[in-house]
Amino acid sequence: MLITLSHINKIFTTGEVAVHALDDLNIVIEQGEFVAIIGQSGSGKTTLLDILGCLSHPTSGDYWLHGAHINKLPDSELTTIRNRQIGFIFQTFHLLPRKSAMENVQLPLMYAGATRTQQQDRARELLTRVGLQDRLNHHSNQLSGGQQQRVAIARALANQPALLLADEPTGNLDSQSGNEILTIFDELHDQGQTIVMITHDPLIAQRAKRRITLLDGRVLADESTGSPTHPVLQEI
Amino acid sequence: MLGAIFRDALKNLSSNMLRSGLTMLGVIIGVASVIAMMAIVEGGQVWLVNSIEQLGTNLLFVWKKRLTIEEKRLFAGRNLQLRYDDALAIRNRFPDLKVAPNIDIDGQIKAGERDFSGRITGTSPEYSDIRNFHTASGRFLQTTDIQTWNRSVVLGKTIAEVLFGTQSPIGKEVKIFRSARKIKKSDATNGEKKEQQAVGEYRFTVIGVMEPKGEISGQDRDEMIFIPVTTALRFFSGNDKIGSMVIHVPDRDQMEEVTQKLQQFLIQRHDGVDDIHIRNQGEFLGAIDQTISTFRFVLGGIAIVALLVGGIGIMNIMLVTVTERTREIGLRKAIGAKRQDILLQFLIESTTISVIGGCFGVILGIFAAYGFGNLVAQSMPGGGDWGAVIKPTAIAIAFVFAVGVGVVFGLFPAIKASKLDPAEALRYQ
């Protein structure tokens, strides 16, 4: 088991109103799975991503990642886990604008303490792997959306993470570029990479091998991909 | 990693040149003012000390105390006043000391049709060495002039030029007489003098012209006129009271001891009355030091306030930068930047501003110091030798303080950045 979420609750309190973003969530994800987490806006997808990505703690419940009891760890160790075990891919790419593709990919390696040469070698290798060997020194404003997302994937893979966490990775891309990104995901999955992809788009979710549907902070359905069987999903 | 963070800092600063430049300007002006202020104050101190030391070194100044009416009544009949005898007695008792008695007479000096009103100083040959003031041509007063009440006179450079133009005055004759006010006073108090004062003027022979010395401590040395002290007493004041004495002590370490001995010696001579002041030249220098220190604190303080304002500028701009780059901070934290990495990144940025600003400030400060120094020199009478003195310590203080300002004022924004919640920061709009 790579990921175990057990009775996870997340409650946000704003003033006197408490919002139950995640409500007794139980999910297990095995090593090498390609899982899509799907749900409408407000279903708790983003909150779940934050907890899976060790960016925030659950209000209650237990989270194990690769054997580490995440919600018992202090912030400093969560930082190390994010650096070594998790690769993030965001809808808006989140590349640093004043840096080249190479430098963006080098960032997680720098924080991991790699030497400059190691950083550069690894960044070059990863950018070649996502087909950007000709764009190594381009800045983000010189790259198309699809290319930027490929740089982000290369950055996410820098420290060979156990988990690739993608948040609407194709949300800002045209269908062709989106398809290219999903093809890279397929390839990575074939190579044994665990991928958790959060999306609101059932067609995109279709590319994953397993689909977890959230509604109001609960798991509505957890099934292999194919035609949605749940009546609510059919409506969606 | 430090190298990468530093490169990042430079890149971030250079990507926003105008903003970085304006922020640096605060530090530049602050550092430059600290250096310039310090340099001007130091220059002033050097100038003042030099002026004092040009008067001669290791000097004791002796003059009569002003007694109150009660004291005068109380000590009536005792041997008070500073007299020429006192100077001679000191010379006998303390042969190591050089003693120059001094009596100033307001008078007029005339050569043909040209004349000059000024102060005529009666003194002894020692004066020249003690005050480090020598003749350019001819000779200064000699012992024989004193012993024989010789009517010889040594002229300051300006007087010589006024009276004789380009001609050499040596061996020429001048007439000297007291100012009218003094004559009247003498007339009223001393009937004997009446005849002399009526004649009024005495012929003197010019024996020397002093070297140019300029103005020192408000007195133009080139307008001085020297005659033998004995001549001055005999022909102009009619008694043996002298105004003051300047005494040279060979060993600087003995100044205190000699002062005490002289004080006792003179009290004894004055029938037990302590009616004289003896001041050490060091006391004047000490007073100057104290004044200069006050200036240093006040001006340095003002300059440091300027530097602090520069620091507030840094803090302001760093807070804006942190807000602008919230998403970047969120991303960096998400992919593995620790709190201290973020803290260091922003701290290095603010410190870089202050270091670069400090460097430019040092350069500007040096220019400003010399510029101001020249301005002061030109605008002050006798301030021609006033130059800015830039001490390495002043540069070091200004620079270190500037860097400190960058660190201290950058700390709050950096801490703020490092404490951002990564999940919230990533989605900051």
Image (cartoon, coloured by chain):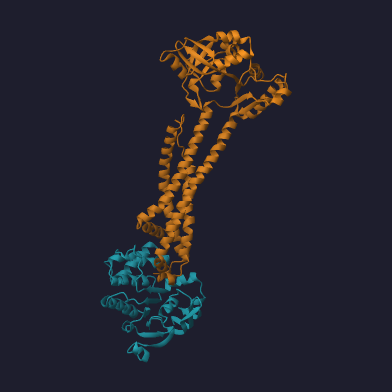
The one of B335 and B405 positioned closer to us in this rendering: B405
In the image, B127: left or right of A95? right
Q: Does residue B391 appear anywhere in the picture?
A: no
Work out whether B208 lies above or below A230: above
Task: Give the colour of chain B.
Answer: orange
Q: Does residue B120 appear anywhere in the picture?
A: yes
Work out whether B392 lies above or below B48: below
Work out whether A1 lies above or below B355: below
Task: Give the colour of chain A.
Answer: cyan
The one of A79 and B414 positioned closer to us in this rendering: B414
Across and down, in percent, residue B203 comes to 52, 9
In the image, A27: left or right of B17? right
* Count of marks, rendered view: 0
Across and down, in percent, residue A58 comes to 48, 78
In the image, A120: left or right of A78? left
Work out whether A38 lies above or below B404: below
Q: Quadrant of residue A65?
A: bottom left
Across and down, in percent, residue B409 comes to 48, 56
Considering the image in quadrants, where does the C terminus of chain B appear? bottom left
Across and down, in percent, residue B173 comes to 48, 9
Residue beneath the point at 47% across and 49% down:
B307
Considering the image in quadrants, where does the N terminus of chain B appear? bottom left
The one of B220 and A121 positioned closer to us in this rendering: B220
Q: Quadrant of residue A217?
A: bottom left
In the image, A28: left or right of B195? left
